[in-house]
Amino acid sequence: MKQSIIQHIQSCLPCQQHNISHTKKAGRLNPIPTPEGPFQL
């Protein structure tokens, strides 16, 4: 049954358009500045 649901969702255009990815897209990482002393942000 799980396989038939997966196949239905993959073949259903409205299902694919509605189920968007909610994860952040990969991009560049921003470096964190090094603190000058302990416990400083």
Image (cartoon, rainbow, N blue to C red):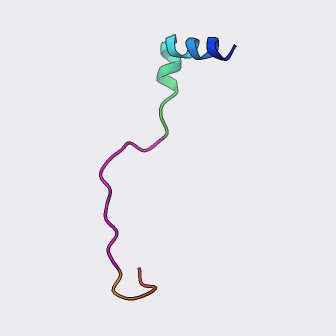
- Count of numbered tags: 0
- Relative to 38, say whether 2 is above or below: above
Residue at horizontal 47 percent and vertical 22 percent from the top: 17
Tell whether 29 sits left or right of 6.
left
Residue at horizontal 51 percent and vertical 25 percent from the top: 18
Residue at horizontal 49 percent and vertical 39 percent from the top: 22
Q: Position of residue 34 (x, y in %)?
A: 33, 77
In this view, the residue farthest toward the bottom is 37
Tell whether 30 sits left or right of 5.
left
| Quadrant that contains the N terminus | top right
- Relative to 33, say whether 15 is above or below: above
Residues 34 and 17: in front is 34
Q: Quadrant of residue 8?
A: top right
Magenta-drawn stretch contains 27: yes
| Quadrant that contains the C terminus | bottom left
Q: Position of residue 20 (x, y in %)?
A: 48, 30
The residue stretch that appears in magenta? 23-34
- Relative to 1, say whether 33 is above or below: below
In this view, the residue farthest toward the right is 1
Q: Position of residue 33 (x, y in %)?
A: 32, 73
Q: Quadrant of residue 3?
A: top right
Q: Position of residue 7 (x, y in %)?
A: 56, 12
Magenta span main SS: loop
